[in-house]
Image (spheres, coloured by chain):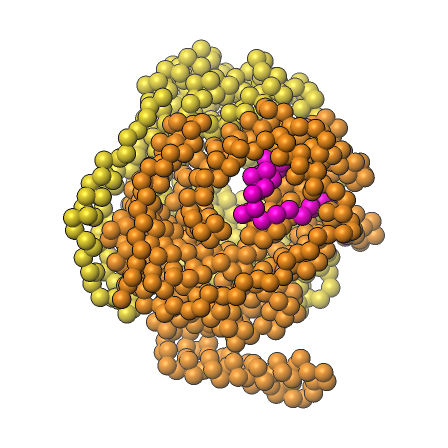
Chain colours: A orange, B yellow
Amino acid sequence: MSRHRLVRLFLITLLLALPAAAQDLASFEARTTVHKLANGWTFLIVERPVAPVFSFATVADVGPAQEVPGITGLAHMFEHMAFKGGPTVGTRDWEGEKKALDALEAAYQAWQAERLSTRPDPKKLETLQAAFRSRQEEAARFVVRNELDDILFREGGIDVNASTGADATRYYCSLPSNKVELFAFLESERFAHPVLREFYEERDVVQEERRQRREGSGFSRLVEQLLITAFQAHSYKQPGIGYMSDLQSITITDAEKFFQTYYAPSNLITAIVGDVQARTLIPILEKYFGRIPARPAPPPLRTVEPPQIAEKIVILEDPAQPLYLEAYHKPSATHPDAPVWDAIDDILANGRTARLYRSLVRDQKLAVDVQSYSSLPGKKYPNLWTVLATPAVGVPTEQVQATLRAELDRLRREDVTPEELARFKARARASLLRGLRSNLGLAVQLADTQRLYGDWRELFRSLDRVEKVTPADLRRVAGEAFRGTNRTVGMIVTSVADKKENGR
Amino acid sequence: MKTRALPPVLVVFYVLFVLSPPTPAAAQAARVDELRYPPLHDFQIPQPERVVLDNGLVVMLLEDHELPLVEATALVRIGSRLDPPGKTGLAELGADVLRAGGTERMPSDQLDLWLESRAASLEAIAERDQGRVTLSALAQDFPEVLRVFADVLRRPAFDPSRLEVMRNQAVADVARQNDQPDEILFREFAKLVYGPDSPYASQQTLASLRAIRREDLVQWHRQLFHPDGIVLGLVGDFRKEDALRLVRELFGDWPRGPQAAHPDFPYRTQSTPGVFWVEKNDVAQSNLLLGHLGIRKDDPDFYAVEVLNYVLSGSFAARLINEVRSRKGLAYSVEGGVDSAWDHPGFAYFYATTKTATTGAAIQALLDEARGLATRPPTEKEVETARQGLLARFVFNVDSKRKVLARQLALESFGYPLDWLSRYRAGLEAVTVEQVRAAALRHLRPEEFSILVVGPAEGRDRPLTDFGKVTPVDVTIK
C-alpha cells in the first residue's frame, strides 16, 4: 500500500568560505532522510545521536493568512484544540461523548442564530443559552481533561507546545528516545481525527489570551493597528489571534471545516531530530501516519497585496510611553531579493555596529533602543520590514524620525562598505551554525524551510545566495523600498490626561 | 584546523540498510496503554573537568566537537543585591558598561567591530544574586576571542560616553516601568514579600541612576572582580589542554582579592496578609499574584516541593491549569507553586490574569486551590504521576554539554555539591505522599497570602474587600 519515496543525501559541498563548518554542515546533511508518505505527508529525519532524546516539529502550511472576516482567530483556535485528544485520549466514553458533542453543537448553533439575528428576542435568547449551557455540562462529564498533556508529561515529554504564526502553525515536543512510538501514536491521532471537545471553554481562554497579549500593552495595541493599516487587501492585515467578535462567534462546525480543508496530509511536514534511526523509524511512520487518507490540497490564497500608493500614519494616543515604528512593504521569503533584505536588516539594525544603533542610540542619543522585525507578520507572502525605535526620555518622535529617515536615505544613495557586507555574511554563516545546536530548533527550521521552499536544503543553500549579495543590490532594493508611498508610520503619543488618572 | 571525515556510524548504517530492508514492525497500537517502550539506552553524563588555579579561579572545561563553536561563561559575585544605598542600579549599569565601554587595549567602537566582524557575541549582565559575562564565538577565533573576553573582565575602560548611553537606557526603563502590567505585578509583589527595604526588592529610580558616576563603576570593578570570586566555564570545540593553558596565561597572574566579609541581605520573614491594589485603567484584565516567601534549594523539603509544583502546575493536566484555565476558562496564563533560589527564598505564589469582570472569580479560584491543598491533599496518583514525569524527563537536564556546564557552574558558584544532579534524582525517588502533603501545608499558607491585583478600577464582579483589607499601592514614578 505504501508507495514511498526514499531520498538519501550525501555530501553536498557548501560553505567554501568556512571549511571546518562545511564539514559539519555536510555531515548534518548526510544524516538527513526525506520520506514522503503516499498520502502526501512529508517527514524529515535527522540522526543526531548526541543524547538519548529527540524532538519533533510538525508544521502545517496554514495560518491566520487563510482566514476571512467572520472566522478570524480560527487557525490559532484549532492549534489550541489540537491538545484536546481524540477518540481514545481524553474521553471516558467516546460513543456517549460523540452524541453529547453533536447535541452541544446543535444547541450552540440555535443560540448563535438568534443572538446574531437582526432583532434577537431576549426571552428566546435566554432559553437557548440555558439549553446550550446544560449541553455543555453534559458534554463535560465525558472529558478526561488534558489527558494528552498528562501522557506526554508522564513519559518525560518537554517543550510540549505549539505556536501559530501568520501563515504557519507549528506543533512540537521533545521526548526520551525510547518513546518514538508514543510520538507516532499521539501525533498521528492528533491529525487523523481530532476531537474538538471543550471548544467553547477554550474559546474563553483564547479571549483571555487576546486581552493579555494583544490588548495588554501599548506596544501590542500599536502593532495591531499598524498591520491593519499597512495592508489594504492581503489577509496579513487581520490580527492573527482574531477580532474579539469573531472569537465570540466561531463554532465547532467552523473549526471542523477548517481542519478538513487545511490539515490534509499533503499540507503537513514533520521533522524529527535526535537519537533516532531512519531505518527503524520509517516503518513506524508508515504504520501510524500512513493510515490517514489523502485529501485534496487546500486552495491557494487569491488576494495579492496591491502596491501602496499613499503614505499612512497611525497615531495612537495611549497612556504608555512613546514608541516609534516604520514599516515598508517588501517581497516574500522566496523572492530573489530576500537575501538582500537580510543584508539591509543586518546592516541597519543588528548589534552595536548597526547603523541605526550607532546614529540614534550611541551618537545622537535620541533613542535608547532600535530593533527591527525582518518579516512582519510572516514571510510566505509579501510582508513588511519594520523598525521600532524607543525614544529616550523627553525626546520628541519627530527627531527620531528625522535621523531614522536620514539613515534609510543614505542606504539609497551610497554603497554600504565592504566591511559591513562582510560582517553580515559572517554573521549569517555563524547564525546558521548556532541554529544547528538544538534538536528542537533544528526540527522547526528544517520543517519550515521544507514548507516554504519545498526543499530543506535551502536552509544551507541560502548561504550561497547571501554570498552573492552586492552593494549595488542594496542600493537598488533600498531605493525601491524606502519611499514615502511604501511606508506606514505608527507611533504612541502618551496621553497626558490618562497619565494623571492612573497615578503614574 | 581539523577536518573530520564522515562519522563511521553512518557508513555502517548505510550498509545495514542496503543489506536488510526494514522489517515490518509490530501491529499498530490502538490505545496509548498498549504501547511498550524499550529501555532508554545507557548514556554517560558528560562531566566537565574542574581545575582551581593558584589564585582561586575555578575553571570548568568540557569539550564538544559537534560544531566548530566555543562558549565561555564567567559567573561573578556582582548581584544587584550588593548595590549601595542611593545607588541602586550600580550592578546592572556596571555590567552594561563593562561590555559597552571597551577595554584598555580596545576602545569601545573597536571592540564592537572586532567582535561583530567575527560573528562573536560577548555580553555582561547583573541579576539580583549574581552576574554573568558570556562569550560565544567560532572555534577558529578561539584564542584571540578569549583574550578579549579576559580583557573585558580584567581591564574594562568604562568609556564615559558609553556610560551615558547605557544610563539613558536605564532611565528610559524606569520611565516605562508602568507600561506592562506584569512588570508592575512582580516588582510590587517583591516589596510585599521581602519587604520594601530589602535588597531583594530594591528598585532603580531616576535619582539613584543619576547618582552613579564613572568613578563608582571603576571602584565597583576594583572591589568585586577577583579570580577567587569567579567561576569560569568553557565548552566547545577545543582541546582541554590547549584551553587550560590559555586560561592560565590569561588569568593566572590575576591577584586574589581581599578577604571580604560575607554580606548580609536582609528580607522580612513575616508575611503581609491583605489585598493590595495597583490601579491600571488601560488594560482589559486584572493581573493577580497571591503568596508569600518560598524556600531555598537546600531546604529539606526541596524534593517534596518539586513534586508539589508539578501537581499544581507542572503540565496542563495539573490542578491549576485544569481547573482555572481548561474547566473554568478564567485565564490564559495561570500557574503556582513554591519557587526556590540558590541562597535565599524565592516566592511561594499563585498567578493568573483574567478579564476585569472575573477578577473576583479568579481570586476565589486561586484561593480555593490553595486551601484545597488541606481539604483535598495531593493524592497517591497525583504524586506518582508527577514523580514519574520528573524522573522521565531527567535526561533533559543533561542532553547537551552546554546545559551540563551551565548547571555545574551555578552549583560551584553557590557552594552546592557538584554531584547535586544525582542527588536530585535520588531525592525525587525517595519523596513520599506524606512529605508532599506536609510540604504543601508548610510552604503554601493561604491565610498569610498577600493578594496583589493590578488592573482597572471599574467593572469587577466582586469588591476586593471580599478578600481582606484593601491597601492601594502608589506606583507613581519618582
Report the residue at 60% width, 40% height from top. A341
Residue extent of the magenta highlight: A323-345
- With respect to residue B186, does A185 lie above or below? below
Residue A229 image-quadrant placement: bottom right
Q: Nearer the viewer, residue A283 or A10?
A: A10
Seen as rendered, the residue at the extreme top is B253
In this rendering, position of residue B282 left or right of residue B108: right
Is residue B300 a member of the stretch shown in magenta?
Answer: no
Left or right: where A301 falls relative to B72? right
Q: Residue at x 62, y 44 (%)?
A: A373
Quarter of the figure with the C terminus of chain B: top right
Query: Residue A249 location in percent, x, y?
Result: 61, 73
Q: Nearer the viewer, residue B318 or A376?
A: A376
Quarter occupied by residue A416: top right
Q: Is residue B149 left or right of residue A127?
A: left
The outermost residue toward the left is B19
Towards the viewer: B20 or A336: A336
Residue B227: x percent and y percent? 46, 19
Quadrant, the N terminus of chain B: top left
| Any part of residue A406 in sight | yes
- Look at the picture and state if A434 lies above or below A180: above
The residue drawn where x is 67% and y is 34% is A475
